[in-house]
Amino acid sequence: MLNLLGEMECHEHAWPFLVPVNTKQFPQYRKVIKSPMDLSTIKRKLQDSSYKCKEEFAQDVRLIFSNCEEFNEDYSPVGRAGHTMRQFFELKWNQTEQ
């Protein structure tokens, strides 16, 4: 999971998801998104051994992209990055499951 997270962090479209959303810049974010998630939080949870199974990790990663879809327009730069990153994650995740 740490290897997959590292690949995601290095992906050219990962920039909107590396750290928590800046709620000073987007004050309405917390009104819309009830369970924020980002790659740095997932990394911390991995390092703290917070995940009890691989599926919990995958749920958090998918939460990033669900939040992205809910908050951003599909064709905005962040929306497009979210779609690209979701496809990348699912492809890599399915490869690790085989």
Image (cartoon, rainbow, N blue to C red):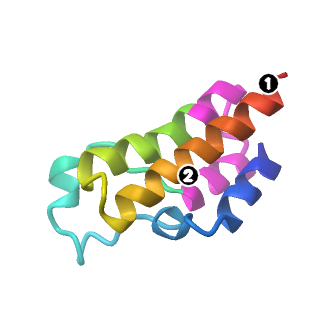
Question: Relative to the observer, which residue lies in front, 87 or 34?
Answer: 87
To which quarter of the image does residue 63 belong?
Answer: top left
Q: What is the chief secondary structure element of the magenta stretch?
A: helix
Write down the residue under mark 1.
97
Identify the mark nearer the N-term, 2 or 1.
2
Residue 12 drawn at (x, y percent)? 62, 69
**Outermost residue toward the top?**
98
**Outermost residue toward the front?**
75
Q: Residue at x 66, y 63 (%)?
A: 9
Question: Relative to the observer, which residue lies in front, 10 or 77?
Answer: 77
To which quarter of the image does residue 59 belong?
Answer: top right
Question: Relative to the observer, which residue lies in front, 15 or 51?
Answer: 15
> Cβ–Cβ below 8 Å for labels 2 and 1?
no
Write down the residue under mark 2.
85
For residue 11, above or below residue 45: below
Residue 14 drawn at (x, y percent)? 56, 64
Residue 77 drawn at (x, y percent)? 37, 67
To which quarter of the image does residue 91 belong?
Answer: top right
- What's the magenta region? 39-58
Q: Residue at x 53, y 52 (%)?
A: 84
Mark 2, residues whose alpha carbon is within 10 Å: few (<14), some, or many (≥20)?
Answer: many
